[in-house]
C-alpha cells in the first residue's frame, strides 16, 4: 500500500481534549520526497514535539539499521541523526517540517506551536506559519504578543523564529494551471488551497484592561483585528451561562451588546505535486444545517469533481461527539448524524458531476455521428441547409431560434431545472431553511456508489475520560450505520497515532 500511496499522514493528536498531550496535530508528506528537508507540512499544532517523541520512543533504538534508518512505525524510512527520541524529534521539527498550517486559533490547535518554537533557535531559519489573515491576526494579538507568550515572529519587533504567510481564501488564482490553479506551495512536494468554514458563533467582547467601551469598540485594534472570546461547557451539562456557538441563535441578554459573529476555521486542500492526488484536512467545523453562516457546501462543490475523477482520496474531518449530544451543545462541532448529512451533500454534488459528464459524452457522440453524416452531403446542399437553419432553426420545445447564447443558457439551466434530473434533491429543506435535502434513494443503486474510494478519517474526538469503551468506538459505529443506510460508499476510520496512514 505504501508503494502505491501519494501521501503519508501521521496523526499526532486525534482528540479535541481534555487531555492536553493528544490534541489536534497532523503531519503530511508526499511519498515522492522520501523524508527530505522541508518535505513535511503540519496541519495544526496543538500537539507537535510531544506527539513526535511519543512515536519515536516506541521504536528507538531497536528498529534502526546500521545506517540509522528507522525500519518500523510511522516514521519508517527516516534517517535518525541522533540517539534519543527527544533529539530526533527536534530534528524533525527544525529540518523536516517546512510549514505549519493553522486552521483556527483555538488553544487545542496552536498550543504546541507556542511551546515548541524556542527550539528553532538552533535551526537555520524561521518556520513558516500559514493561515487565513484572521487566524494570523488572532495569533499575533492574543498569543505571540509578549503577554501570553513572547513575540517569536518576525513582525512587530519580534524574535524572528516564525514568519507569517497570509493565505488567500479560496486559493490564489495567480498561481498554478489546470487542476492546480489557485494552489500555493505548502512544503516540498505538496501544494495547498484554503477555504473558509464556520466553527460556530460567538459574542464579541472587549476586556476592561483594554480601556475600551464595549459599545464603542476598541481604540487599539480595528474591529476585524479582534478575535472574540468563547467559553466552553466542559461537562456538556448546562450551557445556559454561555452561548458561543449554539444554534438556534439566542438573543443577547443585553440588547445593546454587539451581534454575534462567526468563528472562522479552515479546510485545507493538500495536493501532491507528483501525482496530482489530493486530500482535505478540516479544522473544527459545524454543520451547515445549524449554522448561521453555512460554508461547507462551497467545500463540497470544490471537492465533488475531484471525488468523481478519483483525484480526491481522503478527508480528515472532526466528529467530536456522539449522536446523544443535542444540537444546542455541539458548540460549533460535528456529531455522526450531521457529518453524514454533510457527506450526503457531497454525494449529491458527485452524482451531479457524473451525470453532467455522461451528458457531455452523449453529446460528443451525437455530434460525431452528425459530422459523419454531414461529410456525405454535397457542398451545395450544406449551404442550403445552413441558410434554412439560420432562418428558422429553433430549440426543441420552444419558439426561440437556436443561437449559441441560447444553447449555453439551456445547458447551464440543466442544473437548476427540477425536471432535468441534476438536482438530486427531495422537496423540502433542512432546518437552516435554505439548503435542499439530498436524496440517497437517487444513488442507492449507483455503481459505483457516489463516495466509493473515499476514506474518511475522524479527528478531534472529545474524550469523556470515563470508564468503559472509548467514546471513539461509539462514534465510529454510529457513522458506519448511518453511512450504510445512506448508500454513500465511503469508509470511515479512526486513525491510530502509532501507525502511519498511506493514501
Image (spheres, rainbow, N blue to C red):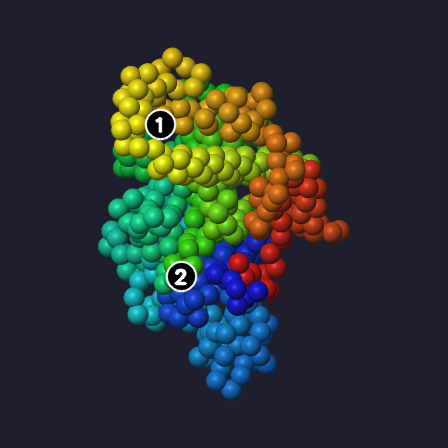
Left of 481 or right of it: where is 19?
left
Q: Which residue lies at the image location 75% right of the left edge and 51% below the top edge?
A: 468
Q: Secondary structure at mark 1?
A: helix
Nearer to us: label 1 or label 2: 1
User: Which residue is farthest top?
Assistant: 399
Picture quarter with the N terminus: bottom right
Q: Secondary structure at mark 2?
A: loop
Which residue is denoted by mark 2 in the rendering? 274
Instruction: In the rendered view, tell whether residue 278 sits above or below residue 68.
Output: above
Question: Taking the image as drawn, is residue 202 in sight?
Answer: no
Q: Which residue lies at the image location 44% right of the left edge and 79% below the top edge?
A: 81
Q: Position of residue 133 (x, y in %)?
A: 33, 43
Question: Taking the image as drawn, is residue 278 in sight?
Answer: yes
Q: Position of residue 439 (x, y in %)?
A: 60, 30
Q: Which mark is residue 408?
A: 1
Question: What crowding class fits label 1: few (fewer than 14 Cα within 10 Å), some (14-19), or many (20 or more)?
Answer: few
Left of 156 or right of it: where is 106?
right
Amino acid at each position: 500500500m505504501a508503494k502505491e500511496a501519494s501521501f503519508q499522514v501521521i496523526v499526532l493528536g486525534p482528540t479535541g481534549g481534555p487531555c492536553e498531550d493528544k490534541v489536534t496535530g497532523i503531519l503530511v508528506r508526499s511519498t515522492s520526497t522520501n523524508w527530505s528537508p522541508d518535505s513535511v507540512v503540519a496541519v495544526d499544532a496543538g500537539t507537535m514535539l510531544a506527539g513526535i517523541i511519543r512515536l519515536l520512543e516506541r521504536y528507538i533504538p531497536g528498529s534502526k539499521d546500521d545506517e540509522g534508518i528507522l525500519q518500523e512505525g510511522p516514521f519508517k524510512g527516516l534517517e535518525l541523526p541522533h540517539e534519543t527520541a527527544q533529539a530526533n524529534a527536534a530534528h524533525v521539527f527544525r529540518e523536516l517540517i517546512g510549514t505549519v498550517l493553522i486552521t483556527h486559533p483555538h488553544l487545542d490547535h496552536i498550543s504546541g506551536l507556542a511551546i515548541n518554537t524556542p527550539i528553532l533557535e538552533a535551526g537555520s531559519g524561521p518556520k513558516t506559519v500559514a493561515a487565513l489573515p484572521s487566524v494570523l491576526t488572532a495569533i499575533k494579538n492574543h498569543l505571540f504578543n509578549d503577554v501570553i507568550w513572547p513575540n517569536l515572529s518576525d513582525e512587530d519587533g519580534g524574535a524572528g523564529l516564525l514568519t507569517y504567510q497570509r493565505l488567500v481564501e479560496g486559493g490564489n488564482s495567480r498561481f498554478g494551471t489546470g487542476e492546480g490553479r489557485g494552489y500555493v506551495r505548502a512544503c516540498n512536494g505538496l501544494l495547498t488551497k484554503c477555504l473558509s468554514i464556520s466553527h460556530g458563533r460567538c459574542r464579541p467582547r472587549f476586556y476592561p484592561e483594554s480601556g475600551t467601551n464595549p459599545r464603542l469598540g476598541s481604540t487599539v485594534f480595528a474591529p476585524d483585528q479582534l478575535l472574540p472570546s468563547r467559553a466552553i461547557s466542559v461537562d456538556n451539562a448546562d450551557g445556559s451561562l454561555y452561548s458561543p456557538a449554539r444554534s438556534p441563535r439566542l438573543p443577547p441578554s443585553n440588547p445593546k451588546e454587539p451581534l454575534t459573529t462567526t468563528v472562522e476555521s479552515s479546510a485545507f486542500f493538500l495536493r501532491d505535486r507528483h501525482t496530482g492526488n489530493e486530500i482535505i484536512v478540516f479544522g473544527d467545523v459545524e454543520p451547515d444545517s445549524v449554522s448561521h453562516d453555512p460554508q461547507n457546501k462551497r467545500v463540497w462543490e470544490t471537492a465533488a469533481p475531484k471525488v468523481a475523477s478519483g483525484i480526491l482520496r481522503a478527508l480528515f474531518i472532526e466528529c467530536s461527539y456522539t449522536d446523544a449530544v443535542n444540537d444546542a451543545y455541539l458548540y460549533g462541532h460535528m456529531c455522526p448524524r450531521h457529518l453524514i448529512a454533510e457527506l450526503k451533500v457531497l454525494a449529491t454534488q458527485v452524482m451531479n458531476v457524473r451525470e453532467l459528464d455522461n451528458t457531455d459524452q452523449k453529446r460528443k457522440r451525437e455530434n460525431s455521428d452528425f459530422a459523419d453524416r454531414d461529410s456525405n452531403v454535397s457542398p451545395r446542399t450544406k449551404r442550403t441547409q445552413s441558410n434554412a437553419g439560420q432562418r428558422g432553426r429553433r430549440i426543441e420545445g420552444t419558439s426561440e431560434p437556436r443561437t449559441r447564447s441560447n444553447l449555453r443558457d439551456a445547458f447551464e439551466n440543466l442544473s437548476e431545472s427540477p425536471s432535468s434530473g441534476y438536482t438530486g434533491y427531495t422537496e423540502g429543506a433542512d432546518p437552516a431553511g435554505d439548503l435542499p435535502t439530498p436524496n440517497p434513494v437517487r444513488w442507492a443503486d449507483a455503481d459505483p456508489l457516489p463516495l466509493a474510494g473515499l476514506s474518511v478519517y475522524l479527528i478531534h474526538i472529545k474524550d469523556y475520560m470515563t470508564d468503559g469503551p472509548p467514546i471513539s468506538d461509539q462514534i465510529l459505529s454510529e457513522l458506519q450505520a448511518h453511512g450504510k443506510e445512506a448508500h454513500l460508499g465511503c469508509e470511515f476510520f479512526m486513525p491510530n497515532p502509532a501507525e502511519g496512514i498511506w493514501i
